[in-house]
Image (tube, grey):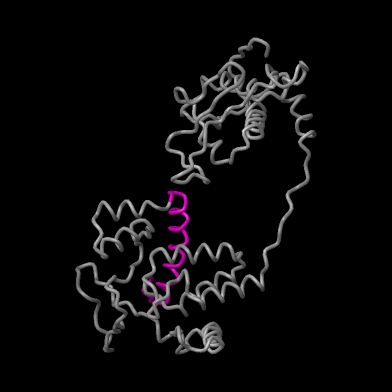
């Protein structure tokens, strides 16, 4: 095991030795060996004449994970807090600190680490610093980006019990230096988005197949409405996905439309002291007297879209995907449309 008081250069050399020789004492001394699994009748498997392997003392009472066990980050955090003396309600509340999408990503990362550990008979919550370093190094060898490897570290840290020197996976200096080395060997490359011009897109949206709207297919109308609402609102994709047709969530006011995302939606920039406001988009005629400019009005496009999807809706989400995007619902012309 890498000691917190050892020489940094020697410890990094030990990590490299563990990588070059997986069966070296640096790695093998920390390996936890699982006991023989029980037979279907609940009895241990037949003896092979050799002494059964033992599990070294690690200060952790959690049993090894077995084949087929579902990894759940939230459940692991809740169980850990319960062992620390938290009440069931407090542990469940604290476990919900991570959003559902984050927990799902962590579960996926943990399943991969769990498989890696079981092949080497390692107890996942008690994996040593050298063992975790080897796992992260294997991810690097698979070609994964450093940002992805950092996310794996965060997922493992959520259920890891920490190291004997008092450090955790999140602040261990040797793991941090290992990841810095990865970043130096595989620096992040800024990928420029394909060049495009807003004027070119607006010019395309002003003609077929998007105009006239009475002849536009549902697929074309969806693309145009979504683009205009996204540009006019300047909101993230997740917020647009949370727009709802529930009562009072879309209100056409005097010179525009006000939209309120679903109440269950938590914005990425939302905090305890900041709550993103409603989305208000004015009609383009309030800013331009040119009649042709109505083709780029998001309020007009939204009215057309709601009308064409009214009989197709099976949910309250504003933007929907229909099984037959070329099918056209009955046309209804809006005044001034």
**Quarter of the figure with residue 156:** bottom left
Where 54 falls versus 321 (above or below)?
below
Q: Is residue 100 magenta?
A: yes
Q: Residue at x 72, y 56 (%)?
A: 191
Q: Is residue 318 magenta?
A: no
Q: Is residue 85 left or right of residue 18?
A: left
Q: Is residue 58 left or right of residue 6?
A: left
The stretch of residues the image draws in magenta is 99-124
Locate residue 134, reporting x and y percent: 51, 77
Q: Quadrant of the C terminus?
A: top right
Q: Quadrant of the N terminus?
A: bottom left
Q: Nearer the viewer, residue 171 or 78?
A: 171
**Quarter of the figure with residue 188:** bottom right
Locate residue 291, reporting x and y percent: 76, 15
**Quarter of the figure with residue 168:** bottom left
Q: Residue at x 54, y 82 (%)?
A: 19
Where 264 falls versus 112 (above or below)?
above
Predominant SS along the magenta part? helix
């Amino acid at each position: 095991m890498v000691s917190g008081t050892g020489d940094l250069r020697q410890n990094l050399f030990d990590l490299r030795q563990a990588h070059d020789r997986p069966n070296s004492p640096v790695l093998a001394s920390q390996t936890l060996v699982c006991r023989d699994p029980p037979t279907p009748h609940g009895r241990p498997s037949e003896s092979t004449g050799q002494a059964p392997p033992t599990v070294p003392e690690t200060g952790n009472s959690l049993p090894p994970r077995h084949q087929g066990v579902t990894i759940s980050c939230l459940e692991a955090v809740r169980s850990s807090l319960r062992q620390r003396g938290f009440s069931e309600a407090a542990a469940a509340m604290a476990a919900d600190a991570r959003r559902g999408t984050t927990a799902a990503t962590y579960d996926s990362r943990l399943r991969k680490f769990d498989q890696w550990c079981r092949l080497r008979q390692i107890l996942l919550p008690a994996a040593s610093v050298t063992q975790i370093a080897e796992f992260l190094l294997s991810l690097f060898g698979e070609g994964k980006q450093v940002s992805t490897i950092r996310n794996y570290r965060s997922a493992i840290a959520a259920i890891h019990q920490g190291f004997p020197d008092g450090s955790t996976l999140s602040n261990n200096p040797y793991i941090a230096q290992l990841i810095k080395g990865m970043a130096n060997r595989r620096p992040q490359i800024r990928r420029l988005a394909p060049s495009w011009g807003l004027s070119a897109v607006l010019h395309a949206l002003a003609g077929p197949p998007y105009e006239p709207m009475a002849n536009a297919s549902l697929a074309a109308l969806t693309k145009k409405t979504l683009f205009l609402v996204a540009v006019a609102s300047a909101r993230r994709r997740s917020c647009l996905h949370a727009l709802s047709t529930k009562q009072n969530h879309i209100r056409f006011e005097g010179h525009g439309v006000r939209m309120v995302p679903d109440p269950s939606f938590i914005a990425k920039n939302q905090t305890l002291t900041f709550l993103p406001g409603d989305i208000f988009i004015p009609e383009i005629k309030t800013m331009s007297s040119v009649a042709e400019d109505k083709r780029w009005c998001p309020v007009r496009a939204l009215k057309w879209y709601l009308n064409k999807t009214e009989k197709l809706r099976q949910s309250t989400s504003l933007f929907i995907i229909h099984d037959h995007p070329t099918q056209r619902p009955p046309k209804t012309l809006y005044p001034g449309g």
